[in-house]
Image (cartoon, coloured by chain):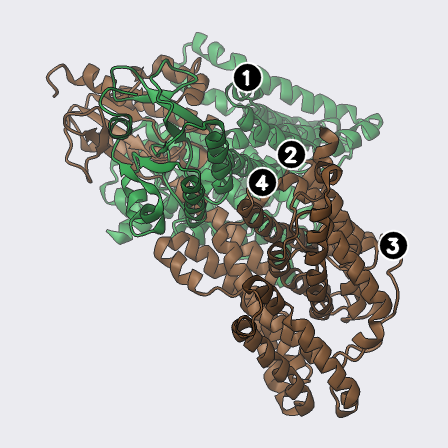
Chain colours: A brown, B green
Amino acid sequence: MNLKRYLPILQWAPEYSRSQASNDLIAALIVTVMLIPQSLAYALLAGLPAQVGLYASILPLVVYALFGTSRTLSVGPVAVVSLMTAAALAPLAEAGSAEYIAGAVLIAVMSGLMLTVMGVMKLGFLANFLSHPVISGFISASGIVIAASQLKHLFGIQASGHNLLDIVGSLLGSLGSTNIPTLLVGVGALLFLFWSRRFLKPLLNKLGMAPGTAAIFTKTAPILAVVVTAILAWGLSLDESGVRLVGEVPSGLPSFSMPSLDPSLWSQLAVSALLISVVGFVESVSVGQTLAAKRRQRIDPDQELIGLGTANLSAGFSGGMPVTGGFSRSVVNFDAGAETPAAGAYAAIGIALATVFLTPAIAWLPQATLAATIIVAVVTLIDLPALFRIFRYSRTDFGAMLATIVLTLVHSVEAGIIAGVALSIGLFLYRTSRPHCAVVGRVPGTEHFRNILRHDVELCPKVTFLRVDESLYFANARFLEETVMDLVAQEPKLTDLVLVCTAINLIDASALESLEAMSERLNDAGVRLHLSEVKGPVMDRLKGTELLEHMGGRVYLSSYDAWKALTGRDGC
Amino acid sequence: MNLKRYLPILQWAPEYSRSQASNDLIAALIVTVMLIPQSLAYALLAGLPAQVGLYASILPLVVYALFGTSRTLSVGPVAVVSLMTAAALAPLAEAGSAEYIAGAVLIAVMSGLMLTVMGVMKLGFLANFLSHPVISGFISASGIVIAASQLKHLFGIQASGHNLLDIVGSLLGSLGSTNIPTLLVGVGALLFLFWSRRFLKPLLNKLGMAPGTAAIFTKTAPILAVVVTAILAWGLSLDESGVRLVGEVPSGLPSFSMPSLDPSLWSQLAVSALLISVVGFVESVSVGQTLAAKRRQRIDPDQELIGLGTANLSAGFSGGMPVTGGFSRSVVNFDAGAETPAAGAYAAIGIALATVFLTPAIAWLPQATLAATIIVAVVTLIDLPALFRIFRYSRTDFGAMLATIVLTLVHSVEAGIIAGVALSIGLFLYRTSRPHCAVVGRVPGTEHFRNILRHDVELCPKVTFLRVDESLYFANARFLEETVMDLVAQEPKLTDLVLVCTAINLIDASALESLEAMSERLNDAGVRLHLSEVKGPVMDRLKGTELLEHMGGRVYLSSYDAWKALTGRDGC
């Protein structure tokens, strides 16, 4: 059983059928066709040579098939992780240099180690601390930065920077040296890709292709753009007109690469590797869970950590770059009918064949075409309406989201994600540090108690029921003390205060001390403190504390019991 | 009104009476006698020349009298802050050097700026994030480190280090070169001080002194030790026997000192200054609040930040060291009858006179005596039984406390306090990320619903009431989704699920998305989702969201209303 948990392949491989195999093979073929331009493009985005993207699409897919729990996730280089890799390596070395490539390998290895360790320690829940608005804002902003960073390839100019301000500034400065043939190729590819996204499917339908097949075929449009522009570049010798091509790519399978063991490099890249791991994991798990739910399957987040961790380790040791489960490819894999992770392994064979046989053709590929495929892929990530949706629902969430977007755009992806997480945690803590408190009264004719400001309820001037809408812990212990003492100061006739504990899920040691101090001060003021509706786990702890001995009042099962006991039979 | 808020002196000075003045003068006299050895000792502890301690006990007291809200707080150098200052400066320069003194001045100025800005921005609540167990553990552990750090002065040997391991290791290495005369003076002073703490008060009582006077007189025993050992040192020329004395102290009032404006020094000391500010503020506010409560007065934490901030600024600009409200001195000031902050200003005059007239005598003071006064003062801070108390009540709080203690002892005060705060916040977040959930049933004959595992309640197989004991936010959104889907999977007969929202004080955007996804999956499974007892602020937000439109079920005011509606008139 335990072996099956850590090696999910044992769950499906023994019953692997011929029909599953043929479905997986078809899906793998389509994914391979999609993955070739994507892996080249994301290597370009990360500032790495083209073959690094291919290498990252071979072994990791096989390893994920062994250790991953999603049946349809397509692992490999993805846009956001590639951008983060470029941002992490930029201060270290020049893009494409040997040190730079070694850095990418090291990030993959470190990220693989971190993910695997987190998986073994069952720390998958940590990803929950990235709230939806923060992820959504981060992905949108990253999409904008990525699209902007690719414009230089469309114009055939030099530009640099890892945030929107730098990139745009740098672009504007060198727009004068635009290379017209490059622009024609790039914009042509871009227009074709946008057109095919919108109109290719209806066209194919009209031509008699089945809707499902047409949808999948549409997703492979990038390979068409790639093939056509590569043939153009070769036929017209576009490189002589200044169109930058991918250039010579070493042919053959990747060989074993040893990551750097330089401790200073490890410490320089540690934070980036951690962020890349977490962001990649969250993206991958979201996709995996969405797809699994559609087929009533489940994925195990902790085992997913191990799956992605080992995939990254294998990427690093085979000269690749950081990988994770990509959104668009996984959807295509799912729609194309992939039934088991074997589809991923078959796609790996496809990519391996490409590295052996297709590299002479890949050399003729214009970089502008790859840039166009990246831009088309990332604009679907940008979801600005989400900003308005979140704004309407919650200012707090909106604040965290906006901070993430703004910092990602004007500073860096790392600053954006860190600020988003820190701010959403900080705002949550701030909120719990000054909880909503309501004086409640009895809804007439019932045993139910509600806020006197919102409902028409019965009251008793001698007995106040105070409901505190938060667990009591160190951050709000003093706040409660002040709230209660203010309340008592305003009600000179008060003889009994009932703390309605429906929303109190925890009383920590600091809050206990505060309650004890409060109960003493209430005693001095001639007011008895009672508790009602204390939950089981809270009551278990309170037993045996001084609070219950000294507080003067009682603990009532329900607020209505307290009401009956304290206000007399006829109400108040 | 506003001026009175920012200048609390305007609240009491206009009505300052003759009797208040005489009470303040008496208290000031006693505090001065206590403050002279303390300020010298804490300067020694911080690795600073003796006069720095005196300087920090003049202007800051006057400034606090203008801006502070506590009537009895005695501001000046204190043990923990002095230790933290020494730890912060140790990596920068040699103790006692000009750079080292400049560093202490800069910490005081930075800490003053930080506190003042926090006060103006009303950030006093931030101090609440230091939980009681963490503070208690930190103070105890600091007390141990401080006491250990003073042993070298008792033995007259060289030793260094800012954590217990280093100090003890260093002490053991040089114990061989113990100076016997120093040890005699130090241990003599130590024994006298411990004896006087225990037995001087009963003795004075027996000799006919009033109990109150005897208690205060006992607290000034250190000055007796100081005077006697200084006379001994002078009469016996103890310096020639190797007893280290305070040595020549420049006579006269402090002059204006300009803090360093070196940006690299500012950034090196920023974290330390922040920690010193926060720890000093928390210590000071705890003492101030305890004493104010005894006389039914109040202090305003935000204005206290300004009071302590300006006091530290004045300490820095007059060549002093970081200051805060000290525990033992404030209690003595309170017990001696101080009625207004004027008592502090009078004490400042006392110290000023000492810097003018007493410096020749102070020069003869053995350092061992000062070390003895520090040791006796800090052992009262050590509260190890608190560890057991907290352990019994809460493992979580105990964990944070233990981490604080261990890291303070074996690494550094800064690591201790940071780990304590981070761990207590982390454990709180962890707890809220996997909330307690209870299936509840109706307590027979009432409208009250409780946990089926703890109470004998009525149930209905078709309708499950699930109470989630936590606000729903990003960290637990997915957890709830899983809990609910597991529950539904176990109950095939289920037609209605009522989410009892008594403990849900917030539903953030992430949790809303999870609830929407959950409601959709429940619909697919043929289960209607209902909500009951949704609080006003939560309901305000939910109105207009898709959740309420699509969830299939209704929102009930009380769980009993839901019970009546869903289970039929005759129960289930």
- In the rendered structure, which amino acid carries the disc numbered 2? Thr
Residue at point 67%, 85% (across, down): A185
Chain on which label 4 sits: A
- In the rendered structure, which amino acid carries the disc numbered 1? Ser
Q: Position of residue B494 (x, y in %)?
A: 40, 29
Q: Nearer the viewer, residue A182 or A554?
A: A182
Q: Nearer the viewer, residue B379 or A82?
A: A82
Q: Is residue A189 above or below residue A31?
A: below
Chain on which label 1 sits: B
Please report whichever mark, 1 or 2, sits nearer to the chain's N-terminal start: 1
Image depth: mark 3 or mark 1 in front: 3
Q: Secondary structure at mark 1?
A: helix
The residue beneath circle 3 is A258
Circle 3 packing at 10 Å, graded few (<14), some (14-19), many (20+), is some
- In the rendered structure, which amino acid carries the disc numbered 3? Met
What whole-number distance in Å separates the C-alpha atoms at marks 4 and 3? 32 Å
The residue beneath circle 1 is B196
Residue at point 72%, 52% (across, down): A22
- In the rendered structure, which amino acid carries the disc numbered 4? Phe
Q: Which mark is residue A125?
A: 4
